[in-house]
Amino acid sequence: MVGSTEAAKNTYQGQMHLLQKEIMGRYFERLTRAAEKGEGKAVYMLISGNPVELIQAFDLIPVYPEIDALQLAVKKSALPFIQKAEELGYSMDNCAYVKADVGLFLGDRKTPFATIPLPSLILCNYVGCNVYLQWFEHLAEYCDGELYNLDIPFLRDPSGQPSPEDITYVVRQLEEVIEICERISGKKLDYARLKAIVGRSGETGEMWSRIKGLTKNIPSPFDAYFDSVTMMAPLYCLRGTEEGLRFFETALKEMEEKVQMGTGPLAEERFRFIIEGPPPWPYLRTFRDLFSKWGAVAVASTYSTVGGLWEFGFRHDANRPLESIAQHMLQWNVTNRNFLQRYQQIRRYVQEWHADALVIHSVKSCRLFSAGQGDMREYFTKELNVPTLLIESDIEDPRYFSEAQIKNRIDAFFESLEHKKLVHAAAEAGGAA
Amino acid sequence: MAIEDFISRHQEILENSPLDLASNWKREHPATKLIGCYPVYSPVELIHAAGMLPVGVIGAGNRLEIAHADSRFQSFVCSIVKSTLELGLTERLKFLDGIVFHSICDPARNLGSVFKRNFPDMMVEYIHFPQNLSSPHAVDYLTAEYQRLKASYEKMAGTEITDEALRGSISLYNEQRRLLRELYALRKDTPQNLSTVECYVLTRIGTLLPPEEHISILKEAIPGLRQRNEKPKDRIRVVLEGSFCEQPPIELLEALEAAGCYILDDDFLLGWRWFLEDIPTHGDPWRNLANAYINQSVYSGVKHDTREPKSKHLIDKVKETGASAVLILAAKFCEPALFDYALYKRALEKAGIPHLCLEFEEKMWIFDKARTEVETFVESMLFD
């Protein structure tokens, strides 16, 4: 077995990680300046299928409470905010992202990474997650910001496509959002500028899609879960900007070089897995090490498609800016697709990304992801014969992470996979003899 | 049959196996197709106008053991999602030809997909109700959504849903809802004459029978109930909120009243009482149905209307009914109800209206704790 001391030496860092720190640092400074010096106006949005292009077109500042909440969790400072919200009447069983954010919002909004500005517009892009509606409804009650529910019809037709009426409904609403942004920013929409931004989003999508395709290589040049999350923040906060595009160019180049050199995130890639579900932010590093010690690398993840699903071909189109933003929101992200479409997305990952197994990380807070994952496990183990591990913790609340229990499950799973591999290899050798 | 006997006979069915009422009806009418309606609201008129019968599939109560569904849905998912799947996995929904789910919450939505995969013979529909109620385009959208369902249900029923048929169904369900509003008004005005359990039973059977039958039951029952002349007891008068989806066990409702409350209004079976007034029957019935959802429906934890806060509606309800307190009765793990509670708590405290928050599960068996909590609350109200 690979010793855990070796895993502990992994730094998992590269050029991309350093650049991400730099540009996200600048983004958070912008938030702080807005909060403390009144420079610029903030628009709160949600990650799933976000229409950040519209916000960039008005030079408004996109603020994602989900990113604030996850940063609090990563910095191990979420719990006091969660508890504050619970004191106010939020239930133990409510999404802890919301609770951490509410706790933060009702205080001085100072965090170890930024001071979060109050919103001028609370734009609830309701893409899949029903809790989003509650979340922003609550924030709107706690401040003077204007609330707009941008309603995205869920993919429910057997074709898996939005109807023409769905697209029209979303485009009409985007036009209403534009009117509000014009009022808030005090300037008219510059349509040519919007087209340029949407064009850059198209290019960014192309880069991101190529980056994601690289993990089909053996070994995979990076971990499509733990390293992808590093790339997700620029994708949502800076998509459509020059800076964001340059980040993805740099990341692509670095990952292509790794492919050429045949290197990956670990000294040796022994298992390739697909992972479903959001990460346990409060214990991200601990969680990663539990896989690394087995030489297990995630080669694709559903979580990295929350904000958008580009690896199956979607690109924003500068010639149809509003329609393509609508299509992105309706169809090209995992959260607005139905649960069975997610099964098929994972199935493609298993096949096309050459995976040995599926790991389902079931989080209590996010029932959009988790409710029914037992059925998903049933489908993959019984119908497709894909070894599947289901483990439970939480995305935000540190009280739901039991390291010993999760470690036991992961160890037992990879031990059994290793055994299967040995048996299989022996059978192959026997067959060849 | 005396109304008391009628209610107690039906109460027993509802306590044991509520869907028996509908499956028995299906046995006698094998040619009619039955469509299950998951909570909260379904446009039942649309199903009825296709010559089919909409049936409320609103959980399994506390007599069904969950033996399979808990391996599909985790421990932190509410009871009704699991009990509904259990009903399917144990072949208790075979009498249904289809089922419809809606965009009320994340587990219910995923349940629709799980149904689709596990029960390929059943037609599983899913309605996305608009959540941008202030946009003028929402009515167009919902009208189109109903047209999409129309095509789907026409195929299933093998018959066209004409505007005339839909108007007829709207008119029929208008009458049913009107009678339910009368029943509720009767309890609000004279809660000593109509217990919450009686009101609940008379409402719930309407989700399991053809509306024509339910209408005649209510028409016969209401005048009789008006004749009652009971003396009011020393009880506090409350509005109950939070049970719009999963339903509390009937024994729990009995316990709440016995603990010293008159419940003047509640949100049980809310989707079947969804409209504040009749839906117009003239003009385009599809658009009327859509417009009613957006402009004439009740407030609810699953409808996010930015035009007016839900807590304002709750406080208005308290004032209109003359209640002196609010009982929040939220299903365990129900995110919409539990989130709403945080806002309700804040608003009720600000308005100086006392409240008590209780959680329940449809599968619960023991009610002593809830009863004690309510008794304590009642005592604090009566003797303070």
Image: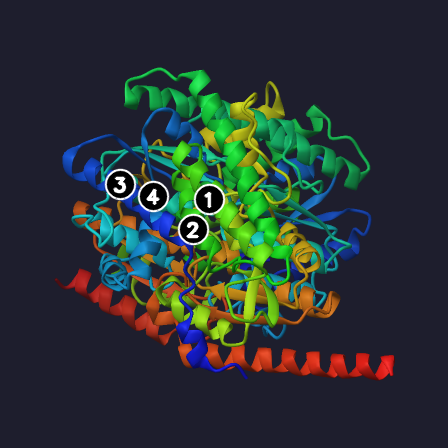
Above or below — where is B317 with respect to A269? Answer: above
Q: Are marks 4 and 1 on the same chain?
A: yes
Q: Is label 2 or label 3 in front?
A: 2
In front: label 2 or label 4: 2
What residue is rendered at 29% in x and 57% in y? Answer: A72
Q: Nearer the viewer, residue A62 or B38?
A: A62
Going from N to C along the chain, the mark reached first, 4 or 1, is: 4
Residue B46, position as x, y percentages in the image: 65, 35
Asked if disc 2 and disc 1 are in contact, CB closer than 8 Å, the reply is yes
Q: CA distance from mark 3 to mark 4?
A: 33 Å
The answer to which of marks 2 and 3 sits earlier in the sequence is: 2
Residue underneath mark 2: A16
Label 4 belongs to which residue?
A: A23
User: Which of the marked residues, 3 or 4, is nearer the chain's N terminus?
Assistant: 4
Where is residue A355? Give x, y as percent. 65, 64
Please provide percent x and percent y for residue B50: 73, 36
Indicate left or right for A426 with A103 as reference.
right
Which label sits in the foreground, 4 or 1?
1
Image location (x, y in percent) of residue A357: 64, 68
Q: In terms of secondary structure, where does tag 2 sit?
A: helix
Residue at point 52% right, 56% down?
A369
| Residue A31 relative to residue B56: left or right | left
Residue at numbered disc 3: A141
- Which label belongs to residue A250? 1
Indicate which label's residue lies in the foreground, 1 or 3.
1
The Cα–Cα distance between marks 2 and 1, rounded to whole angstroms, is 7 Å
Cα distance, mark 4 to mark 1? 12 Å
Quarter of the image where one finds residue A316: top right
Provide the chain ID for the residue under circle 3: A
In which quadrant will I find the C terminus of chain A?
bottom right
